[in-house]
Structure formats: structure tokens, C-alpha cells
Image (spheres, rainbow, N blue to C red):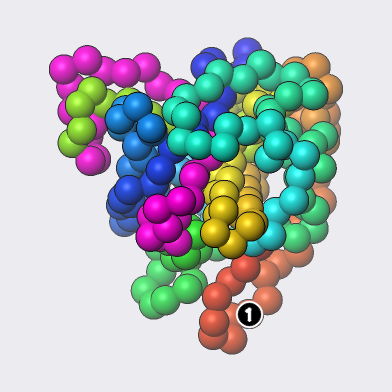
């Protein structure tokens, strides 16, 4: 069955935490909406299924009709019906980016600008530093935990969003999360620069030929995206992956 509680969080990014090479490392983002509610976004940076490196695309000048359907302010959590024509995302059907632009990055590597948390830092720190920026986190909300502090940032009650990645074409035990029009992503609106940034993640084990009703993989043979160019210094750009 599809994931439960799909939607989008519109909020201000106020902090971030990089996790090292643990069993299921995430890039953690602390967000605050305009009503004062705290949230944590848990963004996968490594897959539990081989290959472990995620696919990613970053579009630093993202232009798509979905942006006009989002609240202009840090309005908080909004549930989204998983169907075409609204603000729900679908990597296969929604024409959000070119799959051929996807590359891979490791979850943790010494040095600068050479792993997925480095790439996320580049975008999220920009949003933290800009008081006008709004971060939109698409994914699945987990229930608030009354009386229990968030395990990463300590705010009460614990509350947040995960599955911030493609949520269809899964294999093995993650196949039950499949669905259409329920993919996760990060969008950042930078009003002072009159532009949007899109960050899209997917797992290499996910299929890109999926059923229009269930989101299940339709065949096991999927063409692999091109390998990333060898680093020559500087910042890796575009990409997306399962949890």
C-alpha cells in the first residue's frame, strides 16, 4: 500500500545536523513554521539496499507549475492527495527533472564538496542564512510524540517528515511503500533572488518503469544512469534515491 500521511511541510530552516556513517545515516534539518511549531526533516543519504549511494539531482533554477500551488509563507504541514493535478510530486510522471541528469554521491567522505551531506549543506545553509527563504519538504509525516523530545534537536514534542525521496519502484521489503504521486523532495524558495532550488533523491535499487496505479516496478531491468565524472575539484551539481 502507498505511504501514509503524504504531504508537504512549508517552514523556515533554522538548523541542520550531519550524521556520520551509522546504520541508516540521515541529513537532519530543524524547521520552524509561522505558528511556532517545530519539525525535523530526516533526509536519507545512504540506502539500506545495495548499491548504497543515492542518486541525486539539484536544479538551482527550478521552474515548474507545482511552485504556484505551494503556500508563499512558512505555513506548516499540509496533507496532499496522491493524484495528478495538485501539488503532489511524481518523479516518473511529473516532468520535474531529466533522469539522465542524475548522479551518485557517497554518504560520508573526508574532504569538501565530495559527498551527499556536502551537497545538502550547500543548499540548506543558504536557506538558514536567508530569513526570507522557505523550505518545502515533501514526504511522509510521522505523528507528534507528546511529552517526548525530538531525538536530534531536543524540541518538544517530537514531530517531523521523512521519506524525502522517490517512493515508487521499490524492491524487497520496501515494495509496500510504493505509490504514484507521493514522491518526496526538497524545494527552496529564495524570494530575494527570485528563484527556486529543487533537490531530488532516489535509490539506485528503485525502478523507473512503474505501474500507473500501484507504483510497483513493471520490469526488473532498468537502464543505469550515467556515472558521475571524476572529481576535478569544485562542487558537484545535479541528482536523487530508496530508504
Q: Position of residue 86 (x, y in %)?
A: 73, 24
Q: Nearer the viewer, residue 45 or 63?
A: 63
| Residue at screen point 49% across, 59% down | 123
Q: Position of residue 135 (x, y in %)?
A: 49, 44
Residue 99: tell me if it is visible. yes
Q: Is residue 143 magenta?
A: yes
Viewport quadrant of the N terminus: top right
Please say if 21 is above or below 7. Answer: below
Q: Nearer the viewer, residue 108 or 157?
A: 157
Q: Secondary structure at mark 1?
A: loop
- Left or right, 177 with respect to 226, comes to left
Quarter of the rendering containing residue 233: bottom right
| Residue at screen point 57% across, 53% down | 191
Q: In the rendered structure, which segment of residues is drawn in magenta?
A: 124-153
Residue 171: tell me if it is visible. no
Q: Nearer the viewer, residue 26 or 136?
A: 136
| Residue at screen point 18% across, 22% down | 148
Q: Position of residue 9 (x, y in %)?
A: 49, 31
Query: Tag 1: Cα neighbours inside 10 Å, few (<14), some, or many (≥20)?
Result: few
Q: Position of residue 176 (x, y in %)?
A: 60, 19
Find disc 1 in the rendering and name its residue: 230
Amino acid at each position: 500500500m502507498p505511504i501514509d500521511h503524504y504531504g508537504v511541510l512549508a517552514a523556515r530552516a533554522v538548523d541542520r545536523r550531519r550524521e556520520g556513517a551509522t546504520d541508516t545515516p540521515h541529513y537532519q534539518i530543524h524547521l520552524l513554521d509561522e505558528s511556532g511549531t517545530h519539525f525535523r526533516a530526516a533526509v536519507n543519504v545512504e540506502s539500506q539496499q545495495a548499491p548504497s549511494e543515492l542518486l541525486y539531482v539539484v536544479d538551482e533554477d527550478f521552474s515548474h507549475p507545482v511552485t504556484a500551488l505551494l503556500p508563499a509563507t512558512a505555513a506548516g504541514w499540509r496533507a496532499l492527495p496522491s493524484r495528478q493535478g495538485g501539488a503532489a510530486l511524481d518523479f516518473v510522471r511529473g516532468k520535474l527533472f531529466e533522469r539522465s541528469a542524475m548522479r551518485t554521491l557517497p554518504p560520508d567522505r573526508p574532504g569538501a564538496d565530495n559527498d551527499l551531506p556536502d551537497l545538502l549543506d550547500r543548499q540548506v545553509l543558504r536557506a538558514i542564512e536567508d530569513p526570507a527563504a522557505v523550505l518545502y519538504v515533501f514526504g511522509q509525516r510521522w505523528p507528534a510524540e507528546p511529552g517526548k523530545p525530538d531525538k536530534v534537536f531536543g524540541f518538544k514534542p517530537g514531530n517531523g517528515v521523512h521519506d524525502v525521496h522517490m517512493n515508487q519502484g521499490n524492491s524487497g521489503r520496501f515494495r509496500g511503500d510504493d505509490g504514484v504521486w507521493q514522491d518526496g523532495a526538497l524545494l527552496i524558495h529564495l524570494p530575494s533572488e527570485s528563484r527556486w532550488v529543487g533537490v531530488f533523491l532516489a535509490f539506485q535499487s528503485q525502478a523507473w518503469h512503474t505501474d500507473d496505479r500501484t507504483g510497483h516496478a513493471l520490469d526488473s531491468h532498468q537502464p543505469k544512469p550515467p556515472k558521475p565524472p571524476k572529481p576535478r575539484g569544485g562542487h558537484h551539481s545535479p541528482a536523487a534515491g530508496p530508504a
